[in-house]
Amino acid sequence: MLGMNRRAFLRRSALASGAALCGRVGFAQTAVVSTPASTSVSLRLKLDPHKVENAIPADFTGLSYETSQLSDPNFFSPDNTELVGFVRRLGRSGVLRVGGNSSEYAYWSPEAAAQEDAVAREDAQANVLVVDQKRGPALKTKNTPQAVRNLRGFIDATGWKLIYGLNMGTESAETAAAEADYVMRNMGDKLIAFQLCNEPDLFYRNSLRKSDYDFAQFAQEWQQFYDMIRQKVPHAPFAGPDTAFNNEWLVPFAKQFKSEATFLSQHYYAEGPPTDPSMTIERLLRPNPKLVDEFNGMAQTKADSNLPFRLAETNSCYQGGKRGVSDTFASALWGADLMYQLASAGGVGINFHGGGYGWYTPIAGTVASGFVARPIFYGMLLFAEAGSGHLIDARVDDPEKAPLLNAYGVLNDDVEPRDTIKAVVFNKHADRAVHLTIESGGKPTRARALRLSAPRLDDTTDVTLGNNPVGASGAWEAAREEELPVHEGAAAIELPAGSAALVSFHIGGYK
């Protein structure tokens, strides 16, 4: 990004854009209770590296974009090195999902000329914003061979893999099969799944189907498209149902298509619509019963089908996010905490939806204007710094003193020798600091802390990780890691209200 500093870019982008879980697994989380406001409370977190729980796969992190973005072949391209840099910063492996509402209005055009002119690129970006904010049916766009080839180059440049949405809403099964064939031949093992539709349980709202459209009709259509594509592409992988939020569809889909699907996918938005004044930062940071219901459905489908589960599209507030909520530091705390909640419940991955200048997008910008990290990107970066591996048992004593303090223990499988365990802690209170003593479960020789912070929960521009902002093309390194005093296997850290920290213990052979 040339000639524009980070704050100026964010101002420009703003103008342009128009749980308690069902069980305690590998983390400590508490329910909201009424407690007197206080300046500071003292708590103790106990980690047990011998109690290894759910895995965090290396490709857990993901991003989600609208299919209409493909109408500008220059966006997902290896030549878009700035965007490549931001994606790579989130992890050496991950999953890009291209789909969303616009996938139902994107048409395969194998003979279409590439849309290279500036007008086409501006139209493509405008379409992304319209779709994201759900102002009506999406504009019709074309998916071209050049866009697919460039997408493969982008995937190679990032080291990530791909979920690709096909058009079941307004396209024929024959044409979807032709597109799938070309995508598969170009993507190979970089493609982890095709998704045949986006939020089919809401097709009736988008006038894609009649008001009586139900799961039985959807399942019949899904099977028809699946069969047609598999005839042309015998080894094509699939995921579904990619519903908005409907366990009544998720459970029967898992039962009926467990032999055809590679994994199950569903969406989750914590808030919405953005016009509702009750959709606030305070509400975002509280546990959400809707998420508990979604995870209950996930647990049932996993038990019934033995299929992995992925949140293929998620973010803070649907319809593009809410200004003053989705674009604030609070979204960084919420987003990173959600990633650990999902991993704790057994999910294998998450895709944060975004694109353009939507209020909730992790990476804001365009090819012409450049890109910048929004606050939620910093939460994803904290997750990346903690690393993949396995969760370990983590429990907070006297949790009622700070009901919005969530803590997780992580054991990295890919670190040799295995002498480091980590605690990731989130203080989502706006009114109280926490003095936290962390028992490592071993005999650490040292402990270090990396802080995620901002002046206020509603701050939009001054977010840092390790006392440093994310720069151009995703450039970042910690400017400060704090050495924490260690005494009898424990380290203490002060967590200001509205902050998070990654604490790494060097144990020296805890086995």
Image (spheres, grey):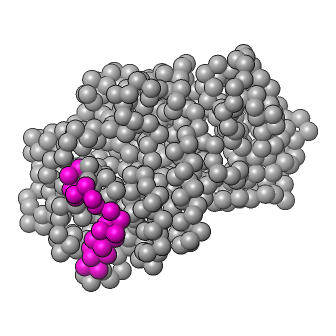
* Left/right of residue 170 with respect to residue 428 in the rendered view: left
Question: Is 136 rendered above or below residue 252?
Answer: above
Percent coordinates x, y for residue 100 in the rendering: 31, 52
Is any atom of residue 213 visible in this view?
yes
Q: Could you say where residue 82 lies in the image, as x and y percent from the top left?
A: 34, 42
Q: Quadrant of residue 269?
A: top left
Task: Compare residues 260 and 355 and report the one nearer the observer.
Answer: 260
Percent across and percent down for residue 322 are 38, 30
Looking at this view, is 81 or 487 the one in front? Answer: 487
Quarter the N terminus occupies: top left
Quarter of the image holding residue 178? bottom left
Q: Quadrant of the C terminus?
A: bottom right
| Residue under the point 47% across and 58% down | 247
The question of residue 216 being in magenta is answered with yes
Q: Position of residue 212 (x, y in %)?
A: 27, 59
Q: How many marks?
A: 0
In the image, is residue 49 above or below residue 468? Answer: below
- Could you tell me if residue 85 is visible in this image? no
- Taking 320 as reference, is 74 left or right? left
* Camera-side residue of 108 and 311: 311
500 w.r.t. 153: above or below: above
Q: Which residues are magenta?
A: 206-228
Residue 505 shown left or right of residue 336 in the figure: right
Residue 48 among magenta residues:
no
Q: Residue at x 26, y 28 (%)?
A: 18
Q: Main secondary structure of the magenta part?
A: helix
Q: Residue at x 52, y 52 (%)?
A: 294
Residue shown at the point (27%, 83%) measured from the top left: 231
Q: Residue furthest right?
A: 488
